[in-house]
Amino acid sequence: MGWNKKANLKEVVIYVLLALAVFSLGYVFVEWKGGQSSFYEEVYAKKIVLSIDKAKPGSEIDYDVSELYRRAKKSGFKGKVVVIDNNENRVRVQLVDGGGYDFNYFNSADIVWELKDETLKMKVVGGDLG
Amino acid sequence: MNTKGFEYLDDIGTFLFVSVVLLGAVGTVMWVFFSVGGDVRGVEAETLGIKLIDSIVENGNFKAGVFEEDFRDDELMIRAGIDKEIINDGSFYFNLGIYKNGELEKEFEEGKGSFKVGCNLKGSSKNLPVCYERELVVFNEDEKFVVKVLTGSNQEGGRI
């Protein structure tokens, strides 16, 4: 088999560039999907709802939401990243203007909550203590 | 015969094909990861079922009042700390039956009734509820009962 150094180098360079292009596309997709605000809104809303549903009256739950603040800051959103509506039994997580995700909890207890130091502090009150 | 992999420019087509297949596989795995990872319906159904059981059973015995005439669905949900409006908004279902010698003694049922059938259907469609089923023996004084619980959730949540 013949050996042509010049031709081989050219081919190697083309293949490397193609490989870089193709796998960069894959990396960009993973970064894009994982970095989407909508993904974090949904995941955090569901996580918070599950912790509320499992909680018994009297429970206190502190939830680290620093990641939400980081992403809200990045997108320029200045509102509350988490809102718990006791009338609708609903948790809303919002990281961008015009965005947000709602998820309902079935726990009938009231949730006293506040956002403090990038932590969601919740206290489950009311309901049957027996 | 080419035994050295992608040696010539002629192989670019093969290279691109292999790359597309690899990217497709990675993309599929990512899609499954991000979609299944956010499905919490099974956990919701289980939490609902456990709450119902805990509200009437303690250490293998029925709590007081369960067999009283006025202890019905509403009272059960109050005891379990479950919001009636949310349960009946179309995304949840529960059925709790108390059996003695195979005969249904008392039944509690709320939510979307079609889930009773949906829970038995096989598949992983988003339209089907994810269910939790549990059966346990519970005593009332010396009498032996069987409690059967079936709960389902199909809450999808909503983007604003």
Image (cartoon, rainbow, N blue to C red):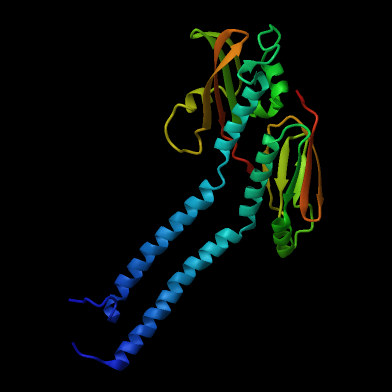
Rendered residue at 78%/42% (across/down): A122
Rendered residue at 59%/39% (across/down): B156
Is residue B90 visible in the rendered image? The answer is: no
Quadrant in which residue A48 is drawn: top right
How far from the left and from the top, in percent, is residue B28? Answer: 44, 55
> On the picture, is B11 further left or further right than A110?
left
Give the position of the N terminus of chain B as an image quadrant. Answer: bottom left
Please give the count of numbered marks on the rendered protein: 0
Quadrant in which residue A19 is drawn: bottom left
* Residue closer to the observer: A56 or B13: A56
How far from the left and from the top, in percent, is residue B127? Answer: 51, 35
B127 above or below B51? below
Rendered residue at 48%/69% (across/down): A25
> On the picture, is B28 further left or further right than B78?
left
Is residue B11 visible in the rendered image? The answer is: yes
B43 above or below A81? above
* Residue closer to the observer: A82 or B133: B133
Quadrant in which residue A12 is drawn: bottom left
How far from the left and from the top, in percent, is residue B25? Answer: 40, 58
A88 above or below A40? above
